[in-house]
Image (cartoon, rainbow, N blue to C red):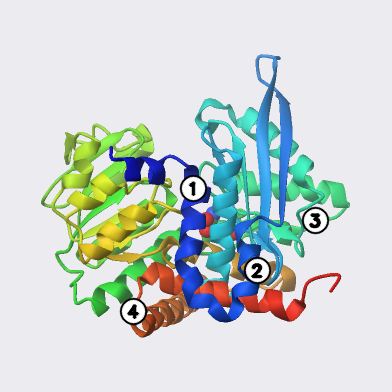
Amino acid sequence: MSNLSYIAQNHGPWSTYLEQIERVTPYLEHLKGYIDTLKRPKRALIVDVPIVMDDGTIQHFEGYRVQHNLSRGPGKGGIRYHPDVDLNEVMALSAWMTIKTAVLNLPFGGAKGGVRVDPRKLSPRELERITRRYTSEISHIIGPQKDIPAPDVGTNPNVMGWIMDTYSSGQGHTVTGVVTGKPIHLGGSLGRIKATGRGVFVTGREVAEKIKLPLKGAKIAVQGFGNVGSEAAYLFAESQSLIVAIQDHTGTIFNPEGIDLAELKIYFETNQGVAGFEGAEMISDEDFWNVEIDILIPAALEGQITIERAQKLTAKLVLEGANGPTYPEADDILIQRGVTVVPDVICNAGGVTVSYFEWVQDMSSYFWSEEEINQRLDKLMVQAINDVWHTSNEKICSLRTAAFILGCERILKARMERGIFPG
Ligand code: GLU
């Protein structure tokens, strides 16, 4: 690995985010005095989460909740359970939430939480205990008007239900609006589970049309077959695209004729992974990046598109379903090579957009139909991607920088208009 790529790829996601802020700074001359507010989180909490394991031993886990920016409203962002979670990662993820909510013009700031744990190694009871203890430790900084968690990698609606219940127990009454992504009968919203994948599809569809890439017959590779990757794959397959490669934590499968997703779904449910699926051949994880494709959907973790992978990628369009999948120097290579990248801060914003709808529904105790939710989601995402596209043409910059210009302007204007206390 070259020295440059070593530097870019070994300082964690927070340095990727800081580099993205450096790149947008020349476009924000008029708000220059306020830029530093984006370079540090407003508040970061690290908590010890001790739980009694099923075998009677006590184990300690490290938990975090970072509120990056609250200038435009309460903090908003998911909670990640993963063995690699650390402060650097949670800070970056919280900052990307700040930008994301601003790009979509949702009335929220950005926050993120996480616990450094492998949820696959926990029993259901241990998962519940860790969730309840973690919630109790962060309960003084969350709330429907303060900071509203949601699902992320390794968490799901059940976990959100326990968060809601634990927080509510402390308040003495049910507070559904403290968390989004809840089960439907606990104040959750229809359409929330599929919303992130749907948003990836909607933004991808719009940009594919702009760059004249027909979806029919387009070859697509998807990294990650969780909530985001699988739903995006289904929607593209409905538009007659071919899903030719899928990678998850169990391995990489490839079928140049297109993988049968209905069959894969059945296989996935019993095997908890794509490896070994009979309707495709297994290839090495690194070969995933060499496959002949039109569209790449990274929908797993950050730091996947390295300089080396960007150099050999055959895709014309990259849809960032994951947060932070592309290193800044890899971004440069993709730009040079004429690859269009729809950045995470808009591409995967469908989830937080329907989270916003869930929060609004909880506040009014009035629930909308799935059709209405999907229509509103489509409308907001189309509007946002058109604004980003227009800004990128006007300023002659990448879609990422354009999204950051729009988002950062909204955040910094709010900061400026509020003023700096105590003045
Ligand atoms: N974790 C998701 C994200 O990264 C959703 C956040 C939310 O719904 O608040 O955007």
Cα separation, mark 4 vs mark 1, equals 26 Å
Q: In this view, does 190 lie to the left or right of 326?
A: right
Cα separation, mark 3 vs mark 2, equals 22 Å
Cα separation, mark 2 vs mark 1, equals 22 Å
| 297 vs 125: above or below | below
The disc at residue 396 is 4
Mark 2 Cβ inside 8 Å of ligand 1? yes
The disc at residue 174 is 3
Work out whether residue 371 can be spotted: no
Q: For mark 1, what is the residue?
A: 13
Task: Give whichever of discs 2 and 4 has the lower sequence position.
Answer: 2
Cα separation, mark 2 vs mark 4, equals 28 Å
Cα separation, mark 3 vs mark 4, equals 49 Å
Say few, some or many: other residues with alpha carbon within 10 Å of mark 1 (under 14 / 14 to 19 / 20 or more): many
- Between circles 2 and 4, the one closer to the viewer is 4
Task: Give whichever of discs 1 and 3 has the lower sequence position.
Answer: 1
Task: Give whichever of discs 2 and 1 has the lower sequence position.
Answer: 1
- Where is residue 287, by image quadrant? top left
